Image (cartoon, helix red, strand yellow):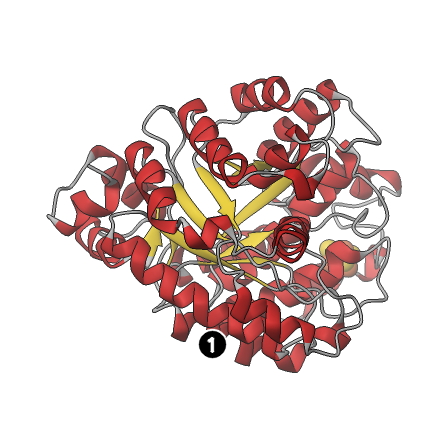
Amino acid sequence: MTLIEEAKRGNKSELVKKCAKFEGVEVDKLLKLISKGHVVVPKNVLREVEPRAIGSLVSTKVNANIGTSEEYVNVEEEIEKAIVAQKYGADAVMDLSTGGNLREIRKRIMDVVKVPFGTVPIYEAARDCRRIVDMSEDDFLNVVERQAKEGVDFMTIHAGVNWMSVERLKNSKRLLGVVSRGGAITIGWMIQNEKENPYYENFDYILDVLKEYDVTISLGDAFRPGCIHDAGDRAKYTEFIILGELVEKCRENGVQCMVEGPGHVPLDGIFPAVKAMKSVTDNAPLYLLGPLVTDVAAGYDHIASAIGAAIAGMAGADFICYVTPSEHLGLPTVEDVKEGVIAAKIAAHAIDLIKDGQRERARAKDYEMSLARKNLDWEKQFSLSPDPEKAKKIWERRRAKGDYCSMCGDLCAIKLVEKYAQKE
Ligand code: SF4
């Protein structure tokens, strides 16, 4: 039985209890949310993981995408990225490798990933064929089963692409067209073969496979806008509606599901987009890449993304896919992965400061930091920082003569207040 089926029966499994403890929420409340599909816990029955609940009431989660490309295959580096991502707090890791021996790379990365592990199966299906257009429908489907049997915890599947959404795309005035790799492969295959998307057409079969291993489906965002100009068009909203229908099917069939979202969205478009997604998917956990709030931050896209993620979280997004400083420019380095995770974790924490179920715990951490600042307790401040080593290094490189820091020196406001502001 899958987790959602167990939850519908009211079974308080060890997994749910563990997640409830981790989140500081009541088991019964969490169970109810899982039964409704408002929270998912991606975990393949074949894999041991440190579980993470994603959705309403629980803390905002962060995913780190890693993986090779055909231009650069260095498995050891990808393994290091996976380790570093977890060290800085990634709650999930996705292997998006497209270069080298994909099965071997996946296995090696999976071995070091202790949190939920995700993939985009269509990448492997496309790599296994000489030409994308030559893929058979079975190629699309078989890879899902193979990866489920290997223990993958969640998979992005672009099932929201069908002829209805493709027609909207054809009639749109998009500048960048389709920027989702999985979406581009699917749409290209459909147009060239004049056939319906195998993932959409065989969705019941996909659900049967995922159900057997309790793999969580992440309904892919094929039409995510790749630039501000393309945000919020009819193609994207058509896909939202189809995804909403697929969410219903997942829940009816006992498969946990979440929904992916855009992309590049201007600040004032984030709230309506997130609210619409949450509404048409009946509050399915929402997994967002960014959104990036501007197109002009190359080299600093992790910042553009964190700004968007914080606003999206305020509107109801649950799961943030990090963006690294290398976004739009190249395959990230280990250092980029670290920067990307930290930027996304800051956004996630900012969301938790105002999120139902998490506000109190998140604010306690901020209170602790503020107290450490008031007490000029530097070790405590370092330990509460996203990167304690970096924080300590900055403090030490221009070390002050007193117990304050070099920013204000002996005009340290905290010291002055302590000394002069309290008159007997
Ligand atoms: S010196 Fe300035 S920045 Fe540093 S602790 Fe004191 S008030 Fe804060």
* Residue at 31% from the left image edge and 49% from the top image edge: 24
- Is residue 114 toward the left or the right of residue 295 in the image? left
Quadrant of the picture in which ligand 1 is shown: bottom right
Left or right, 60 with respect to 410, comes to left
Q: 394 or 29: nearer the eye?
A: 29
- Write down the quadrant of residue 132 in the picture: top right
Residue 273: % across, % down: 55, 75
For mark 1, give the secondary structure: helix
Disc 1 residue type (three-letter): Lys
Residue at (86% x, 66% y) in the render: 296
Q: Please indicate, yes or no, whether residue 80 appears anywhere in the rendered image.
A: yes
Q: Is residue 176 above or below residue 182?
A: below
Query: Which of the pair 246/304 is nearer the observer?
Result: 246
For the C terminus, the quadrant is: bottom right
Binning the other alpha carbons within 10 Å of mark 1 as few (below 14), some (14 to 19) or many (20 upward) gives: some
* Residue hosting label 1: 275
Nearer to us in this view, 244 or 194: 194
**Which sits in the foreground, 84 or 106?**
106
Q: Is 225 placed above or below 71 here?
A: below
**Farthest-out residue, right:** 398
Picture residue at 54% right of the left edge, 66% below the top: 163
Q: Position of residue 34 (x, y in %)?
A: 26, 52
- Vertical side of 76 occupied by 339: above or below: below
Residue that lies at the very extreme toward the front in this rendered image: 194
Location of residue 93 by image quarter: top right
Would residue 115 be seen by someone viewing this image from the given angle? no
Q: Is residue 160 left or right of residue 47?
A: right
